[in-house]
Image (cartoon, rainbow, N blue to C red):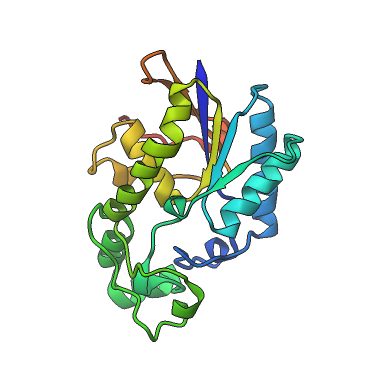
Amino acid sequence: MNNLILVRHGQSLWNKERKFTGFMDIELTKHGESEAEYAGNLIKGLNIELDAYFTSQLKRAINTLDIILKVLNKSNVIINKAWELNERHYGGLTGLNKDDTIKKYGAKQVQIWRRSFDTRPPPMDTQHPCKKKINSNILSESLSDTIKRVIPYYEKKIKPLVSAKKNILIVFHGNSCRALLMKILNISKEKIIEFEIPTGNPLLLKFDENLKVQEYRYLDLKRAKKILVNV
């Protein structure tokens, strides 16, 4: 039985400040680094040999993976970095404080922008203070848009390894992880909005001979309550 381990990066500076982050390249906090180290120890406790490593092109995910690899005593391994695994682009909301945005637009509207399946936030215009720091032609994304880049990448680069019974670790982001789980666990677009992804808590998925998920669980059970929905 082969294993796929999914990890949302540790807490970033903008997670702590409750800012919409998206494509912005933000560092981990000290707490985020500790979460990554703890995630590494949880993975180490599985006592399995990992065969492939994937992450996004954003340093909060890359640095989380680096910390995990140090815990696992893995060096000189090939790390596959793909923009397709980046966080969802939050458009004009990028850099805004979530609480301030709720006060301005209302909780209902902000919830639609954050959790709706196919509604994009307002696009990032050329005057946005983060525009020059983001090297992308994308101006805003819904979860549906994110799925359209995550799933083709998974099908082309990762699924063949799953088929070959390899053990794989992916470190990425809340919405790119949500997009992948929607596919793997066959979660409806109505249910996916309830699906919360915690920082630094590895999610272990085990596949059977027919590539169906036989088991899935968070490794830190204390933080797993009310996280997984009935799919």
Report the number of discs: 0
- Picture quarter containing residue 45? top right
At x 48% / y 28%, what residue is drawn? Answer: 161
- Picture quarter containing residue 58? bottom right
Residue 85 in the image: state x and y as whole percent: 45, 50
Report whether 119 appears left or right of 20: left
Report whether 212 appears left or right of 157: left
At x 61% / y 52%, what residue is drawn? Answer: 62
Residue 119 in the image: state x and y as whole percent: 23, 60
Vertical position of residue 68 compared to residue 173: above or below: above
Vertical position of residue 63 compared to residue 43: above or below: below
Name the quadrant of the C terminus: top left
At x 25% / y 52%, what residue is drawn? Answer: 117
Residue 123 in the image: state x and y as whole percent: 30, 73
At x 38% / y 63%, what residue is drawn? Answer: 89
Q: Residue 216, can we see it?
A: no
Vertical position of residue 198 compared to residue 124: above or below: above
Residue furthest bottom in the image: 127
Nearer to me, 170 or 37 = 170
Residue 26 in the image: state x and y as whole percent: 57, 65
